[in-house]
Structure formats: structure tokens, C-alpha cells
Amino acid sequence: MSQLSDRQKIILSLVVHEHTRTAQPVGSKSLIDQYNLRISSATVRNEMNMLEEMGFLRQPHTSAGRVPTEEGYRFFVGNLVQHTSLPSATRNTIAHQFYQSRKGLDHWLPLAASVLANQSQAVSIVTAPHSENITFKHLELIATRGNQVLLVLVLVGGEIQQQILTFDSIHSQEQLSQLAQQVNHICENRSVEQIKALTPVNNPNLKLVLEAVVDQLSLANKLVTGELYLDGLSNILSEPEFTDLQADSSPLRLLEERPLLDDLISRTVLSEDIGGVRVLIGGEGTWQELQNCTVVLTRYGIPDQFSGTLGVLGPMRMPYGQTISVVRYVGELMSDLVIENLID
């Protein structure tokens, strides 16, 4: 990585800020006028030429000003963006929204997506917490229609799996509740392998339910992340970078095709500690769909037990300091709420 002088760092920072604000190439005169620089326009042009030669700026058109390159943004994020906290008023407003909402992850998760989208003016991405050790907690059997029964399986950590079972005959809700109580006694706090190892049972209904439990636990074990919540898509559709989106090469494809998003999360932020923030600029040469985008992600939850992912996706020219601070704070808040939820 090239060494930048203090003046070059300042000029690169100002180009990033100005381009973020206007979405237009930045010229030397506009920098001097906008930021009251006490150096000549020729000196600024010379420094911008040097930054272009080093790969931090580029000139989209011959007579235009400069815009940051992916490397310019990466240097800015890695070296020039200071760790700043959100203003206390913003933190209090966000915290108040969560603690005023109804209690439970099913309310906090969509709220987190809404808060992130509003605060960042980007697309928010929130996945429900997913247990790293899938374990049975509780099961309910609910009579529906005829001999069909809804199985509702709650895992340790709060994840919920559902499946429709078809019994040989019609059962009353009281009978189903007794059967569910029997299953809960047998399976409580057991893993899928422990349930598989149980002594075979002769009761056909009990056998049917236990087989369904094994299937659902096995399915949960294969998941990388929990349920997905998105918000704020209109925020990026209004940005000039996304006016000519192509379905096969745009960030929309990443958001619409869950395996792509799971791949992104599993190969990036899942290797970070809880609370660590990962900034992906321009797809990092791996995800073509993100060529003009930046994704800021963090993990929240309880280390080695139960965690989810949250963050935002927006144009490369996003306000990085604000966005990173918002993602970090909402992640910390969600971790606290997850711990409270599990304790209760």
C-alpha cells in the first residue's frame, strides 16, 4: 500500500465526502471553494493526479473531476474513518424505539431492519439469531382440519420450526396436548443425534412426531442463518448508481436469492467476533452483484451459542462513519436484547 502524505490523506477524505454528498466527480476548484483550502488549485490538481496514479482516484471523463476508486474507499475506511459513536440523542432515540416495542425477537427483528434502513438510507439486512448447537426446547401439537396436525417446534434460543403431520385418525386437542407433553419429556435439551439414539417406540403417533422432530432439527442444522428481514429497498433504487439495474448483475439478485446472501454472510461476517464490523467494498472481487455497492455487516448475539447478522447495503459513496456507527450500535443493542430474551 502506497504511503500517503498528510495532505494527500486530507484531499482523499474531502473527495470521498464531496462525492458522497453530490454523486458527481469532484474537481480541484470545488474542493477549494467548498472546504476553504488554503492551497492553490494547481497544488490540489497535482495531489489529485498523484492519488490517481496510486489508484485511489479515477477520472470518469477527460474533462471531469475525480471520484474515489474501490481502493480509495478501502483506504478511507481502513485508515481515515475514525471510530466515532453516534450522537447521544440518536442512540437514545433508537434505544427508546426498541424498549417501547412489544417484547420478543419477532418484534425486535423487523424493528431493527426498519431502524437501520431509516438511519442509513440504505437497504437493511437482518437475519434472525441461529443456534450454533441445535437443541430441542419445546413442542406443541395443534389440531387443524380432519386428521391433520400442526407441529410447532421451538429450539433452544427461540427459533421456531413448523410442519403439518397427518395422523391415521382424528385426535382431540386434549389428546394432542398429552402427546406433546410426552415428547417434551423425552426430548428436552437433546440434540438431533441424541434423539435419533433413543430407544424405538411402539406408539405409531409418538413415532411419527419423533421422526418429524428429527427431520426439523436436521433441517435447522443445515441452515447458515435464520429468517431474513429486509427494509429500505426504495432507498437505493432512488440513487443514480442504480437507475439502470439489471436483474442478473445487480444487488437485487443478492437480496432475492437466499443462497447468494448466505454465501456472502458465511464467508465474511460469520468469521468475525460478535460485535465486529465487516465492510465489503465493491464485492471484493468475489461478488459481481456488488460491484457498485458497499455492505456493512456485524454479528450480534451470544458468542459460541446463538447469533444473527445485521447490516446495510448501499452505494459505495455512503457516509461510512455514520453507517458503521449505526450498524455497530444496533448490533450491540440486539445482543443485549437477545441475552435478556434468553434469560427470561
Image: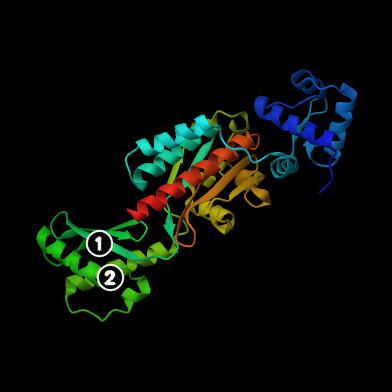
Rendered image quadrant of residue 148: bottom left
Of residues 51 and 119, which is closer to you in this image? 119
Q: Are marks 1 and 2 in contact (CB under 8 Å)?
A: yes
User: Can you name the residue that lies furthest to the front here?
Assistant: 88
Q: Residue at 32% of width from left, 68% of height from top? A: 189
The residue wearing badge 2 is 187
Q: Earlier in the sequence, mark 1 or mark 2?
A: 1
The answer, for residue 232, to whether it is visible in the render is: no
Estimate the x, y position of residue 218 in percent, counting from the top left. Answer: 38, 67
Q: Residue at 81% of width from left, 42% of height from top? A: 55
Estimate the x, y position of residue 133 in percent, counting from the top left. Answer: 42, 66
Estimate the x, y position of residue 273 in percent, counting from the top left. Answer: 56, 56
Q: Residue at 65% of width from left, 39% of height from top? A: 292
User: Can you name the residue that lies furthest to the top here?
Assistant: 33
Of residues 83 and 278, which is closer to you in this image? 83
- Marking on residue 139: 1
Q: Residue at 87% of width from left, 22% of height from top? A: 41
Estimate the x, y position of residue 253 in percent, counting from the top left. Answer: 53, 45
Total count of labels: 2
Q: Pointer 2: residues within 10 angstroms few (<14), some, or many (20+)?
A: many
Q: Secondary structure at mark 1?
A: strand
Q: Pointer 1: residues within 10 angstroms few (<14), some, or many (20+)?
A: many
Q: Secondary structure at mark 2?
A: helix
Position of 50 with respect to 179 (left or right) is right
Q: Give the amino acid at mark 2.
A: Cys
The answer, for residue 301, to whether it is visible in the render is: yes
